[in-house]
Image (cartoon, helix red, strand yellow):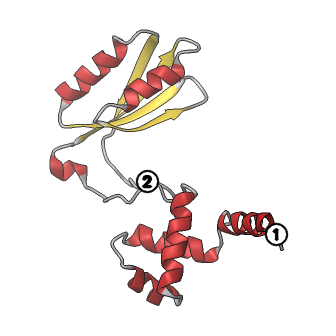
Amino acid sequence: MSLLYHKIIRITMTNKIDDLDLNIIRELRRDARQSYRDLAEKLNVAEGTIYNRLHKLQEMNVLKRFMVDVDFSKLGYDLTAIIGLKVEGGHLPEIEGEISKGRNVSAVYDVTGEYDAIVVAKFRNREELNNFVKKILSMPHIKRTYTMVVLNVVKEIHGVEL
């Protein structure tokens, strides 16, 4: 068989997510510090298989990075704000890009409905929040903002249960 055929088969196989890939992701979401050996034992596969699957998932950008789950309130970030933005037409991508650079910003979403974008950010105090909102309002092409402050966090994880 031709080299091209083998390359096509390899690409097709490597771009498919199967149950083992999902199980690896589930395990890593529980504890991303697990070793290849521990994952292999839990999932009853060879350690090399774990290595190859993780490499494939990273190449496909399914696994973008490994993160630590931090309780930011214990680091002084007691205030979470959800900010709706109204932006003049055509300028949304540049505004979102600029806002997403903020060190307090954890999410920026394009949305449908009354607002063009939603920003989620964490702050140590009202003054930091106030300065952040004023900075946004001073940006060209921002029509208005609508800020909501989170009173209680009932659930805060990134992603969904697989």
The amino acid at mark 2 is His
Q: Is residue 123 above or below residue 145?
A: below
Q: Residue at x 54, y 59 (%)?
A: 59
Residue in the image at 24% along x and 49% along y: 72
Quadrant location, the C terminus: bottom right
- Tell me: 21 left or right of 105: right
Can you give x and y, in whole percent of width and height, for residue 159 in the image? 49, 55
On the picture, is 11 further left or further right than 96? Answer: right
Q: Is residue 123 visible?
A: yes
Q: Secondary structure at mark 2?
A: loop
Earlier residue among tags 1 and 2? 1
Q: Nearer the viewer, residue 78 or 91?
A: 91
Quadrant position of the N terminus in the picture: bottom right
Dot 2: within a 10 Å radius of its alpha carbon, few (fewer than 14), some, or many (20 or more) residues? few
The one nearer the camera, 69 or 66, is: 66
Work out how far the residue at label 1 is from the one at label 2, CA to CA, in angstroms.
Answer: 44 Å
Q: Position of residue 24 (x, y in %)?
A: 51, 74
Q: Position of residue 16 (x, y in %)?
A: 68, 66
Residue that numbered label 2 is attached to: 158
> Of the residues tagged 1 and 2, which is closer to the observer?
1
Q: Amino acid at mark 1?
A: Ser
* Residue occupied by mark 1: 2
| Residue 6 placement, left or right of 116 | right
